[in-house]
Amino acid sequence: CWAGSFQAVGSCLPPPSPPMAARRSRALLRALGRGSGAVGGGYVLGSAALYAYDRDDFDACLRLQRMAWLASRMLASYSWHMHVAAHPTEVAREESLRLCHERHAPQVRDLCFRNGGVYIKLGQLLGLMDHVIPFEYIEALSGCFDSCPPSSTRDVDAVFAEEFGKSPLELFESFEDRPLASASLAQVHRATLPGGRQVAVKVQHRPLLKTVRSEIAGIELVLSLVRSLEPAFGFQWLVEEVKENLPKELDFRLEAQNCARCRTIMERAGLANAVVVPDTYSSFTTQRVLVMDFEEGQSLAATARDMCAEGVRPHAVVKRFSEAYAAMTFSEGFLHCDPHPGNVLWRRRKDAPGGFQLVLLDHGLYRELPRELRLSYCRLWRGIALADGEAVLQATRELGVRSEWLVQKLNEEGRDGLGRLASASAPAGSVGDPETNAGKMLAAMLVAKSFRAVADGDGGFLRFDKDFRGKNTADDRAEVARYISGYFRGILEVLDSLPRPMILVLKANDCLRATASRFDVPPSVPLVVSCLACCKALRASGDFAAGGGWRIRWLEFRCWFFLSLEGAVSSRLRGLRRALAGA
């Protein structure tokens, strides 16, 4: 009875209160839920408002969001590899790193294509720098040089309306809506001027001019945050280059001026009938539209077999391409900074030297090289070719390169082993100073050889009969891949310390070497052309190497003899081997 009474009374009492900690936890969860809902709702409402107010800015924000997400995933992946994961051997560490590259390289390529515009331009810049970027990324980013997503006819008409107040058909007798080609910043249409002249019309992708500065600022912010979290990822030099030069590329009036100056340089170099630069039409040119002569030709992306079928030797094409860039870089200090194969055409012309012509396109980005910088670069090439380690290091000091990390790395390795260049400025048994090691690394990057191989080189880095001719592309890739893996952070520090114009010089140098490799032409050909041009530029300036001008003249003769022999004999033998293989 008493038990039943107590049970009845107990049922009427309130439930016992939960502990204080549990109440606080539930309150915190409720607050977090409300906060998350408020943030999510604000994000959705803000996105909807931005979409309704300005679709271009909304798309730019989406692109930045995609990049930030991928950057965070890659940062976590590489940081785990470098600082957390255990690797029993150096081989296991390199294999793990290679797997990271294989996993993320396609993701970077897909991001570039999905975002387009500025991001494809970044992918193209990285895709040429095979002395810096692991091969997996070079291979994946090679797709950035193919045709890019085109603008719609509606966007093209909008650009003409904004620039001219007219439609394309009001300006031209005919205008093909379908573009001939689409690149990262613009696309090209074929049209006919009043009077019947065929022209190429370059039309900028519509939203670029409006969003480019905000997009670059966003990219810079993301990469700065990444670098603050992981200093090894030092790609600030890349953003600085794009930030300075991309706005210039988006002004097509500057491109018309660059065309005229480039044509003058080719005439001075005796290449007027060998290298063609299209004429432009100022009355039809604005900031976002450029009209130039329509030039026929095939892209340098063609195969060596295609050239041989037309009776054109790939060796001669690579040599002339290199001569054109050498004239701009070493003689004039006016450098075409976007030299990928899609911007160069070749065509058969019986009345031209060698029976063919090159056509240089896309003159949107040039860089003036100050005289002292240009001559320091020439002295660097001369020192490399003469195996003059002291001259090499003096030239790299003039360029201001340094790397503290390389000194630390070599100390950890516990030995010098750097051979001839080390003895030029470092005491025996030491690892040298930041400037010395950075100079050796820059020399290695220029000739696309490993850090150790360049520093140990004997008898000149351009041993035409030994160091380059007997090697194939696979050997080069494997060797360079090993030194990129081992000295990656040092390479980034060297690039950070270089004068900014030198980044684009290195990019052009890489493009020439990649073009030679594509046509099975020895990489020594563009290197020797550069060496010959720098010798002529130094002689013209009165700058002679120690020991008198005879050394420069002897080096010029060696270069000339090598190019003549390589063109007359070796390239024909390779052509015969290709023909026999095809048969």
Image (cartoon, rainbow, N blue to C red):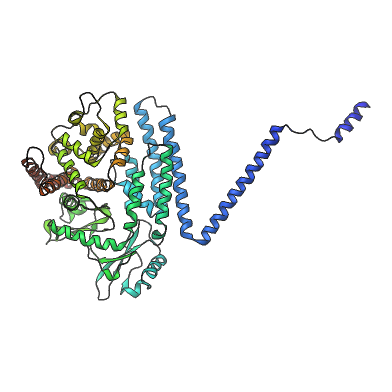
Task: Look at 65% across and 39% down and name the residue there.
Answer: 28
Q: Is residue 180 left or right of residue 387?
A: right
Quadrant for residue 6, please give it.
Answer: top right
Task: Look at 27% across and 45% down and name the residue there.
Answer: 499
Q: Is residue 178 left or right of residue 279?
A: right
Residue 583 appears in view: no
Which of the two residues, 58 or 275, is positioned nearer the viewer here? 58
Where does the image place residue 551, in percent across and percent down from the top left? 7, 40
Circle count: 0
Q: Is residue 32 left or right of residue 337?
A: right
Outermost residue on the left side: it is: 550
Quadrant for residue 350, please give it.
Answer: bottom left
Which of the two residues, 196 or 550, is positioned nearer the viewer here? 550
Q: Is the residue 570 above or below the residue 114 in the image?
A: above
Task: Look at 18% across and 54% down and name the residue there.
Answer: 309
Quadrant for residue 413, please give it.
Answer: top left
Q: Is the residue 413 above or below the residue 287 in the image?
A: above
Task: Look at 69% across and 32% down and name the residue there.
Answer: 21
Where does the image place residue 142, in percent across and percent down from the top left? 32, 48
- Quadrant into which the N terminus falls: top right
Where does the image place residue 193, in percent across and percent down from the top left? 27, 73
Where does the image place residue 100, in percent across and percent down from the top left? 40, 37
Residue 368 appears in view: yes
Which of the two residues, 292 or 243, is positioned nearer the viewer here? 243
Outermost residue on the right side: it is: 1
